[in-house]
Image (tube, rainbow, N blue to C red):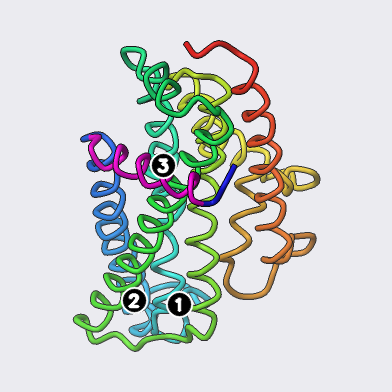
Amino acid sequence: MGLRALGRVAGAELGKLGTLPAVRWTVVGTVGAAALLSAAMTNAAVGRAGAAETGTVEAGAAETGAVDVAAAALQPVGLVQIGLVLLGILAVSSEYVDGQIATSLTGVPDRMLFLTGKTVAWLGAALGTALLGVATSYGTAWLVVRLDGTPVGNDDEVVRAYAGAAGYLVLIGLLAYATAVLLRNAVATVATTLTLVLLVSPYLARFGGVARFLPDLAGKQAFHLGPLPPGALPPGTGILVLLGWCVTLLLLAAVTFRRRDAG
């Protein structure tokens, strides 16, 4: 598998992704959702800060009357991740519509070259979407706070937290991508992935213990701000745990993809 061949395949797959209306709308919708959710959540934080400043809320709730822009703008990540999950699933499921996978493998008979090139192309698209999403979220939150005239709270960790948020979004999407390669069924993959990140993990998180090693719970530590709760994984460890899940699923997906029939 030469780098030149890999580059050609990755370029072709990136172009193919760009031609899919569902992929384009998912990217636009993800970035748009980041902006809208950030605006709504930051506006709520501004309201709480204003209430605290005038003494109309309980002590301890936004006591300084300032808004931490970084913290406010990171709140939508838990919902924005749905867009990256869908992006990962769409990249794979599109191959199994009308037998497209057979055509793709006719053009690139080396299955590992094809899958690697497709994965590299997807990672490029996902990284661009994630970076644009977190930047839009932060920019929207900052604008809401500044327009209101509310003091801006401490955001010293913003670079680390936003790099972690972008990395988390890409990796959670990659997890869905690998699952889609394994299952070859968009509905099954959506059900499996979203049930994990939206239902199972939040429920198990209440009990602590080994639940902290679930892919999404571990990965979310990468953009945690402030002191860590007792027993929580450090940000670096959390993102490595999520990466480990992704690598394991990708290897399993590659082995399965190589051995089974094209359809």
Residue 16 magenta-highlighted: yes
Instruction: Indicate the amino acid at tag 3.
Output: Ile
Q: Residue at x 39, y 63 (%)?
A: 131
Q: Is residue 247 left or right of residue 196?
A: right
Q: Pointers 1 and 2 in contact (CB under 8 A)?
A: yes
Residue at label 3?
82
* Dot 1 alpha-carbon crowd within 10 angstroms: few under 14, some 14 to 19, many 20 or more: many
Which secondary structure, mark 1? loop
Residue 42's quadrant in the figure?
Answer: bottom left
Of the numbered discs 3 and 1, the one sitting upstream in the chain is 1
Q: Residue at x 52, y 86 (%)?
A: 156
Q: Amino acid at mark 2?
A: Ala
Residue 107 lies, with reference to residue 209, above or below; the image says: above
Quadrant housing the N terminus = top right
Q: Is residue 120 left or right of residue 87?
A: right
Q: CA distance from mark 1 to mark 2?
A: 9 Å
Task: Confirm or deny contact between disc 3 and disc 1 (CB under 8 A).
Answer: no
